[in-house]
Image (spheres, helix red, strand yellow):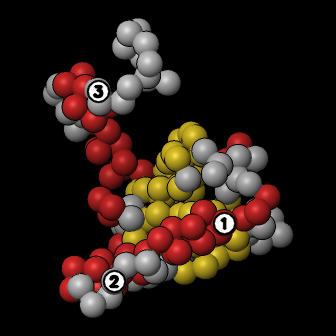
Amino acid sequence: MGQLLGEYDCKIDAKGRVMLPTGLRKQIEPEAKDKYVVNRGFESCIAMYPYNEWQKIYAKVNELNLYVKKNRDFVRYFFRGATEIELDATGRLLLPKRLLEYASIEKELILSAHNHLIEIWNKQTFENLLQQEPGEFAQLAEEVMGSINTGGNSGEVS
């Protein structure tokens, strides 16, 4: 699995196209073949998955038992708005209007890449989110990461 990393300031044109930054494109595995799937993410962002990573997630979601109501609810919401998109000849992606509206993206956006996905944020929403850093970030880090055993006593996560 490719690990993506970085934050990129971008602008979107009047037609809903955004240039995928070269630094980010270089991180995408060739198996994605310049194809992506976008859908609604958490906290009002758009989640964008390289196509090869989307296929892995799709397979996991399809293992859910649809006779269980909460599974059906999750599947409906998770796939709501999911759209396959491709880079055009100039390296731009055409983002669906409904997803842009969902994320309140009009002109400026942030691409925040981590793990296997790229979150697409309204620039102001993203900046506001980061300003709301938990007061006790060290405590949060301990709660979230403290159970990971690194095999040493250095206190560092490997």
In the rendered view, does 92 fall on the left or right side of 130? right
Residue extending furthest left? Answer: 135
Q: Nearer the viewer, residue 37 or 9?
A: 37
Callout 3–callout 1 Cβ contact below 8 Å: no
Residue extending furthest top? Answer: 154
Q: Circle 3 — which element?
A: loop
For badge 3, the amino acid type reads Gly
Across and down, in percent, residue 3 comes to: 60, 45
- Mark 3 nearby-residue class (10 Å; few <14, some 14–19, many ≥20): some
Q: Residue at x 54, y 80 (%)?
A: 83
One can see residue 69 in this view? yes
In the rendered view, does 116 fall on the left or right side of 24? left
Q: Circle 2 — which element?
A: loop
For badge 2, the amino acid type reads Asn
Q: CA distance from mark 2 to mark 1?
A: 23 Å
Choose mark 3 or mark 1, whichever is in front. 3
Q: Residue at x 46, y 80 (%)?
A: 62
Q: CA distance from mark 3 to mark 2?
A: 33 Å
Image: 42 above or below 140:
below
Decide which of tag 2 and tag 1 comes sooner along the chain.
Answer: 1
- The residue at which mark 2 appears reads as 65
Image: 24 above or below 71:
above
- The residue at which mark 3 appears reads as 146
- The residue at which mark 1 appears reads as 52
Q: Nearer the viewer, residue 113 or 148?
A: 148
Q: Quadrant of residue 33?
A: bottom right
Across and down, in percent, residue 111 comes to: 53, 51
Q: Circle 1 — which element?
A: helix
Across and down, in percent, residue 40 comes to: 40, 71
